[in-house]
Image (cartoon, rainbow, N blue to C red):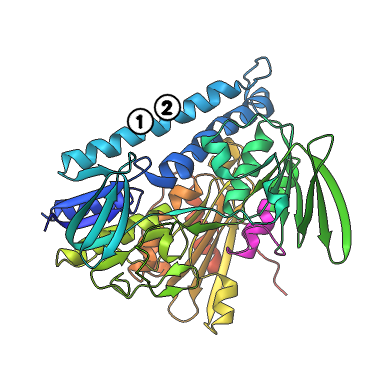
């Protein structure tokens, strides 16, 4: 055998699996035909957040600096420098990952990897040279790509995907329609609105962020309208055609039609797994719809071949893929995985930030689970007022009898950092009383956690008490 483990794909699932397997003492190779880091690092999470960091600062400078006592000329955006900075962040992180693979003794092989059968992988170089490698185990971690429907209207000039923005050379649009009000659409809507673009979001479902707690979507809708973003929910884009301004988009909702004109249309309607030439022509895998079907050990229908990340569905998040990669590496080394894979934090890097984990009120009702819930409005939180992000809330769902923490949803400053506390709480079956044992410092966003917990018992200090009947 050439290797004990060969991994196809060096994204957040693949490279993490490679490093962890090497730490367990296994001989590992990872095959990557593009850039180390995969979608997340090169054209996803990291560059998007780099853009959002700049746009948030720009919005603050123009909207809030005077209120803070900082008198300056209106800030302007250097579009080329913005993208140069984004590339610098990406390249620095990519170099770090490459260094970690080397330091852990992982062989990084450039080329396209294809499974030939149990224990056999073909490596095709950019020049077309092919060599066969052998391994005890193979992990598929090829990731995903943006969905782009096949209809001709989605292939007109000016119709773009997130890849075009993050890796291409798109201009600074004056107006943009975004089809899709999920996480990707919401983050790009926030970014473009903050740099002065007229943004319209078109979402087919009744609310933004349809997979999260409904109050998160409704609060984000209000935040977007405050920023001047036009939001159409329960609406489809029935047609796109070229116009003098750029593109004319036909909207349809409850039998009514409307047209808007924009420079460009961003299609943000999800992602599909990268399966192109991943398997030899004579091989088939059992599938779960468009995703690879795996068992509880992530093994596919081909013995010794495993799959993780966006290839197998789930939330299609980088941290989920990384956790799955670590789990497979542990199992292959005869170790026990330490992370609960059913607890995946969802994070949206809009302003204010959004995060959630565990059960929502709606899901609890669907499953017939008796719960109590309450929320604390962050308008009463000193840190939120100081930093001018006092719109939002922290909301808990707990078991009615034991008060065990079942779910948390929040829209507030630093929500994507705060959520980790509750992954630990739910994983360890902690109760409301357990979380109230710790003292939280003042002034901080995390004080809102204590207030939200106390609100379940109608004991929130910084909330006006409800009138007794």
Q: Secondary structure at mark 2?
A: helix
Total numbered labels placed on residues in the image: 2
Q: Quadrant of residue 182?
A: bottom right
- Percent coordinates x, y for residue 42 in the rendering: 43, 39
Q: Identify which residue is drawn at 32% across, 43% down.
A: 128
**Disc 1/disc 2 C-alpha distance (Å):** 6 Å
Where is residue 440? Give x, y as percent: 41, 50
| In the depicted structure, whether residue 77 falls above or below residue 113 | above
**Magenta residues (range):** 205-220
Magenta span includes 206: yes
**Label 2 CA crowd tier, 10 Å (few <14, some 14–19, many 20+):** few
* Quarter where residue 26 is shown: bottom left
Is 323 or 352 nearer to us in this picture? 323
Residue 382 showing in the rendered view: no
Is residue 194 highlighted in magenta? no
Residue 90 visible from this viewpoint? yes
Q: Is residue 415 left or right of residue 37?
A: right
Residue ID for mark 2:
88
Q: Residue 454, image x and y in percent?
A: 51, 63
Which label was assigned to residue 92?
1
Give me the residue at 39% from left, 67% from top: 426
- 72 lies left or right of 410: right
Q: Are marks 1 and 2 in contact (CB under 8 Å)?
A: yes
Q: Which image quadrant: the N terminus? A: bottom left
Q: Is 468 above or below relative to 187?
A: below
In the rendered structure, find residue 429 and report the number of the disc placed on it. Answer: none
Residue at x-position 37% and y-position 40%: 35
The quadrant the C terminus occupies is bottom right
């Amino acid at each position: 055998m050439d290797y004990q483990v060969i991994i196809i794909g060096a994204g957040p699932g693949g490279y993490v699996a490679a490093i962890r397997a090497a730490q367990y003492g296994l001989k590992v190779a990872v095959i990557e035909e593009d850039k180390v880091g995969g979608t997340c690092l090169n054209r996803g999470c990291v560059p998007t957040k780099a853009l959002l960091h700049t746009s948030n600062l720009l919005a603050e400078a123009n909207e809030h600096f005077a209120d803070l006592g900082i008198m300056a000329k209106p800030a302007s955006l250097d579009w080329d420098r913005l993208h140069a900075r984004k590339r610098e962040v990406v390249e620095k992180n990519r170099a770090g990952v490459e260094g970690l693979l080397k330091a852990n003794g992982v062989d990084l092989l450039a080329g396209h990897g294809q499974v030939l059968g149990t224990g056999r992988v073909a490596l095709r170089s950019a020049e077309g040279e092919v060599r066969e490698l052998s391994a005890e185990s193979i992990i598929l971690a090829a990731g995903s790509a943006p969905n782009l429907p096949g209809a001709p209207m989605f292939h007109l000039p000016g119709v773009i995907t997130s890849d075009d923005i993050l890796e291409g050379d798109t201009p600074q649009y004056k107006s943009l329609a975004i089809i899709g009000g999920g996480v990707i659409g919401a983050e790009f809507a926030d970014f473009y609105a903050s740099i002065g673009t007229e943004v319209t979001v078109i979402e087919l479902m009744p609310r933004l962020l349809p997979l999260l707690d409904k109050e998160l979507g409704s609060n984000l809708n209000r935040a977007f309208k405050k920023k001047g973003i036009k939001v159409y929910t329960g609406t489809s884009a029935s047609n796109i055609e070229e116009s003098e301004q750029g593109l004319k988009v036909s909207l349809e909702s409850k039998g009514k039609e409307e047209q808007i004109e924009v420079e460009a249309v961003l299609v943000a309607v999800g992602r599909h797994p990268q399966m192109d030439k991943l398997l030899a022509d004579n091989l088939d895998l059992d599938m779960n719809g468009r995703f690879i079907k795996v068992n509880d050990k992530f093994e596919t229908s081909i013995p010794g071949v495993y799959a993780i990340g966006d290839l197998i569905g789930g939330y299609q998040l980088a941290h989920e893929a990384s956790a799955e990669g670590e789990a497979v590496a542990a199992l292959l080394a005869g170790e026990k995985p330490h992370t609960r894979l059913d607890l995946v934090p969802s994070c949206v890097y809009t302003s204010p930030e959004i995060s959630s984990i565990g059960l929502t009120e709606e899901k609890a009702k669907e499953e017939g689970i008796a719960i109590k819930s309450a929320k604390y409005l962050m308008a009463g939180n000193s840190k939120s007022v100081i930093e001018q992000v006092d719109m939002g809330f922290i909301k808990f769902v707990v078991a009615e009898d034991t008060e065990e923490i079942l779910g948390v949803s929040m829209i507030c400053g630093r929500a994507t950092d705060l959520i980790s506390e509750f992954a630990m709480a739910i994983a360890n079956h902690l109760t409301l009383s357990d979380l109230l044992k710790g003292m939280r410092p003042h002034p901080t966003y995390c004080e809102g956690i204590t207030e939200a917990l106390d609100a379940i018992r109608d004991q929130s200090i910084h909330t006006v008490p409800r009138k007794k009947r």
